[in-house]
Amino acid sequence: MSFNRDAIRLLTEIAQMLELLGENPFKINAHTRAARAIKDQTKDLSTLADDRPSLLAIEGIGPKIADKLIELANSGSISEHQKLAAQVPAGLMLLLRIPGLGPKTVRMLWQERDITDLAGLNAIIADSSILELPRMGKKAVEKLTRAIAFAEQDTGRLYLGVALPVAERIIEHMRTIEGITRAAYAGSLRRGKETIGDIDILVCATEPQAATEAFTTMPGLVAVVASGPTKSTIRFELDVDLGRWKFEGASGDAEERPSVQVDLRVIPETSWGAAYMYFTGSKEHNVRLRQLALKHNLTLNEYGLFPEDKADKTPPQKRGIAPVASSTEEEIYHALGLPAIPPELREDRGELALTETPPLVELADIKADLHAHTTASDGSLELESLVTLARDRGFHTIAVTDHSRSAVIANGLNLTRLRAQRNAIDHLRAHTTDITILHGSEVDILADGSLDYDNETLAWLDIVVASPHASLSQDAPTATARLLAAIGNPHVNIVGHPTGRLINKRRGLEPAIDDIITAAKEHSVALEINAHWLRLDLRDTHVRAAVDAGCLIAINCDTHRATDFDNLRFGIATARRGWLPPAQCINTWPAPKLHAWLARKHSS
Ligand code: DGT
Ligand code: CA
Ligand code: CA
Ligand code: ZN
């Protein structure tokens, strides 16, 4: 019932705009009340557009509102809404989406300080002049600051871990279509970004029409947004339960299934490399490449790298000019005097200064997982199953690191249970030869930076992963001191998910990351990239800083259930985006080297 939904939205917005303009409360209230009344309706009100009496019979809908509903049904819009929208800056309506910021406050900000958007609001918070305004005490402003931070978290972008399987499903399908000679995903997904705006698929096809046809009718399709000979856009279903992750479908109807936008481009075989490069992006990387091409008297576009002809504005491919390079990305990079640049590096973060392709960690390099849970705390795998899964992955080492005692919700282990776990591990070790089982702990870093077990216990363990779980909204200096204290503990090997952020959900700690990296290097502590797609913490930019500083990195799955090992590739993507070479990642080390490095901080 998209009509009812539109009506509710428009009436609510009218009420909000009236309030922002300081209009009559009765008039405002009439619109709010009508919106509420429509929410309770189970029938599509557009069917009553020529039945005014029935509309009026609905409690909460008066004659003026009834006219607006009829207008909406007949014309698709409400003129009053448009008139008001012309008077109210759009930024104010966005401010209203911040939890706790109502029309009264937003109007006051507008009237008193001419604030019309978030940037303006942030500015008067930053210089504290907001404190001079009515009802804006220190407490209220603190609350507002937190609400803004929270609202900024949900970027409306899809998790890498959700988008990638969808793209793979689509590509697998496209490859079954006759005449399709190539199919690949590009865009931010290929660059391994932690979140994805939309999915970009490229194909080469002997019959472009058939490719488009297959794409716009494929299983899992929710809606066709646009369909043309070389470019089409669909919305594709998400088969993951994302809770509040609701997308609007093409018609704007929220009742449609959750879906993601997917762009398809049909590419001529001869310009595959140029198109793959162009649509992989990033945009910033592409801009740099085009500038570089111009320096070489060349011009680069999605069809190829061509000799530059400043006199002719017609694109070279349309003039029958032969490209210098076009069929592979490598060819084009080489023609520009560059080494092949891996997709994860294409962010305009210095990659054009590379003289050779740097060594980057790969999935196959990973030989150990050093952070995993069992049924002893909050995992769903028995010890034996965890070890079996790790062995099946080809790992030489698996560390069992259940939660420590303060993690009550996660059923953290007290000392008695920790010792009992050692017995179980010793028992399993007695008939295990092909994989090393380390007995460790994921020890809580408490709010003050102290650890959840005494030093004697930490020394007795084989490995210690220290992680922050609670008090994650500490201010930056406190968070820095907390993590530095943990890093300074003589028995800590790894700091697990150092900030505790959850993508789109929780900002987490914001420590002075350079200080953390310096200390980690000094104390021979590895910082973890937690491979779960909700965490990816450290994030790419932190990894890059750590790599530059020569700090060690761990990539761990933080396994709680069997499928969690599959998340490793997301951790790898983040690592590569941080330019991590395999040698700097402790999970790639041969067993003797890794074990010796860990043992330096432990007694057993
Ligand atoms: P997303 O979807 O927001 O996560 O990010 P991308 O990077 O996938 O961006 P998208 O889907 O808009 O476009 C895919 C690629 O196509 C992008 O990375 C670079 C290229 N591209 C798109 N629009 C432009 C543009 O206006 N200029 C340039 N140079 N490249 C563009
Ligand atoms: Ca994209
Ligand atoms: Ca796109
Ligand atoms: Zn964990």
Image (cartoon, helix red, strand yellow):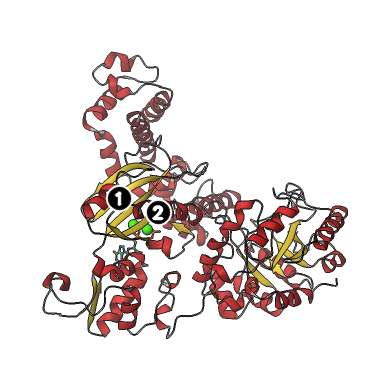
Label 1 – label 2 distance at C-alpha: 18 Å
Q: Position of residue 353 (x, y in %)?
A: 41, 83
Q: Which mark is residue 233?
A: 1
> Which secondary structure, mark 1?
strand
Of label 1 and label 2, which has the lower sequence position?
Answer: 2
Mark 1 vs mark 2, foreground winner is 2
Q: Which mark is residue 172?
A: 2
State yes or no: Cβ of the residue under disc 2 lies below 8 Å from any atom of ligand 2: no
Quarter of the rendered image showing ligand 3: bottom left
Name the residue at 51% across, 61% down.
126
Q: Is residue 31 left or right of residue 272?
A: right
Q: Quadrant of residue 444?
A: bottom right
Number of marks in picture: 2
Quarter of the figure with the N terminus: top left
State the residue in front, 359 or 198.
359
Name the residue at 54% across, 62% down.
569
Number of residues whose C-alpha sits closer than 10 Å to that of mark 1, classed few (under 14), some (14–19) or many (20 or more): many
Q: Is residue 497 left or right of residue 213?
A: right
Image vertical order of residue 224 relative to residue 325, above or below:
above
